[in-house]
Image (spheres, rainbow, N blue to C red):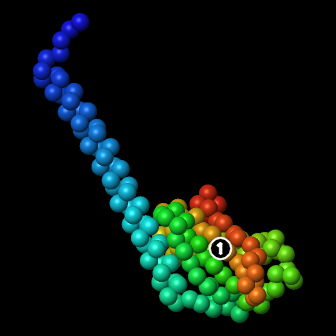
Amino acid sequence: MTKQSPSKKRQGIRIIAGMIAFALACYGVQQFFKTDVEAELARVALELNNRAPIQFDEFTRLDSASAKGAINFSYYYTLTNVDKKMIHSDTVQAYLKPTLIDNIKYSPELKVYRDHEITMDYYYYDKNGDFMTTITVTPDVYMD
């Protein structure tokens, strides 16, 4: 068995130490940006909640919003002229989902969501406050 010279050992230790430092730095940067995204989503949710309820049109009112970590944002809407007993949730899905996907894909205001591949959840309630449906739009849907 051959002995390594002290300089080769030191070089090996430096390489390993450098790799560990690089890995820790990458992890730290990822955590920093994750926290940044989480903080930004939480800020947006708070801002929307402070302004809510927001009537978008004669049928749709935003009641609240919430952030779930750095990967998910939820909106809670009331369809103000809709009674759950009068319309099926599949109809609501078929009507709203394509519009939501297009909005996420092309709206300049939602670019930050696209950039960070945020999953968007839209919860819909009828005029009586009864839950109707959830529409989830994931990055694989709006990034194609």
| Neighbourhood count class around disc 1 (C-alpha, 10 Å): few under 14, some 14–19, many 20 upward | some
On the image, which quarter does residue 10 sit in? top left
Answer yes or no: is residue 108 visible: yes
| Residue found 85% across the figure and 75% down from its top | 88
Residues 18 and 128: in front is 128
On the image, which quarter does residue 14 sit in? top left
Residue 30 coordinates in the image, percent (x, y):
38, 55
- Left-right relation of 94 to 72: right
Residues 32 and 108: in front is 32
| Residue found 59% across the figure and 60% down from its top | 139
On the image, which quarter does residue 31 sit in? bottom left
Answer yes or no: is residue 102 visible: no
Query: Residue at label 1?
Result: 122
Q: In what quadrant of the picture does the N terminus appear?
A: top left
- Depicted 46 relative to depicted 16: above or below: below
Q: In what quadrant of the picture does the C terminus appear?
A: bottom right
At label 1, the amino acid type is: Tyr
- Left-right relation of 96 to 144: right
Residue 64 coordinates in the image, percent (x, y):
58, 82
- Left-right relation of 81 to 7: right
Say which element carries label 1. Answer: strand
Label total for image: 1
Residue 89 coordinates in the image, percent (x, y):
80, 73
